[in-house]
Amino acid sequence: MKNPIITIEREYGSGGSVIGKIVAEKLGIPFYNHEILEMASEKLGVPVTKLQGAEESAPKSFLYTLLLNSNPSRTMGDNLPVSDKIYITETQIIKELAQQGSCVIVGRCANWILRDNPNRFSVFAYAKKAFRMQYAQDTYHVPAKDTNTLLVKTDSRREKFYNINTGGNWHDKGNYALCLNTGKLGIDGAVNLIISAVQNLPETE
């Protein structure tokens, strides 16, 4: 694949963000995760700290989301919830970033937003709960007593956000080119598989 746009959806604690960052570094391409929220903050003129809690909050419905995306210039001036304004703005940013060339984008329904882009290579990172709980404790320093609750809450929020915005199923393997069990593969193994896959795919026009 000549100019891959690698999108990564991930279960909490699966290491998806770290994997994406390493892949981007090894391929020498831009990496976007929280940077997208910062860009949205600038476009909306709202501090990042005020947007963080609203990001990945589900909109009213899939049909509502389609309505918003059909005419963002009109709806952005309406009295929309902050979460909807963020999603619309981030959708525009993701499309703009993809037009600039190869990159890695984590979360935010990027695989669905870029579903018509022939250079999109979508990945889903997952692992057993025990691995993810330990990863969260070791990497994010989450107290052991809070890990399970945070894991369940975060996964539930991400799944709902994805399902409502796309009308699909976050866990449906048909949405992805590559599904990686990071508990089995490890971070390095997952990174190597992604790089090998995008380097060996046929080039798109």
Image (tube, rainbow, N blue to C red):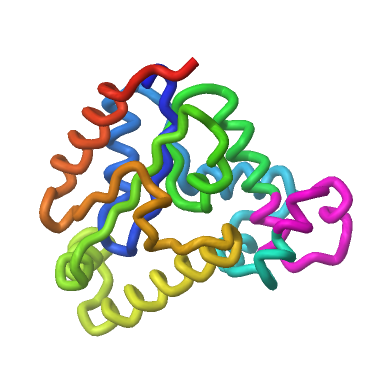
Identified at 63% across, 39% down, the residue is 93
In the image, residue 80 lies in the stretch drawn in magenta: yes
Q: Quadrant of residue 58?
A: bottom right
Q: Is residue 162 above or below residue 196?
A: below
Q: Position of residue 204 (x, y in %)?
A: 45, 19
Q: Is residue 83 above or below residue 7?
A: below
Q: Position of residue 97 (x, y in %)?
A: 57, 31
Which region is colored magenta? Answer: 66-88
Closer to the camera, 124 or 108? 124
Question: How many labels, in total?
Answer: 0
Magenta span: chief secondary structure = helix
Identified at 22% across, 38% down, the residue is 191
Q: Position of residue 40 (x, y in %)?
A: 65, 47
Q: Is residue 25 above or below residue 170?
A: above
- As drawn, the residue found furthest toward the front would be 174
Q: Quadrant of residue 145?
A: bottom left
Q: Which quarter of the rendering shows the N terminus?
A: top left
Identified at 39% across, 60% down, the residue is 172
In the image, residue 144 lies in the stretch drawn in magenta: no
Identified at 39% across, 17% down, the residue is 203
Q: Is residue 73 above or below residue 142?
A: above
Side of 12 where 103 appears, left or right:
right
Closer to the camera, 53 or 19? 19
Q: Quadrant of residue 149?
A: bottom left
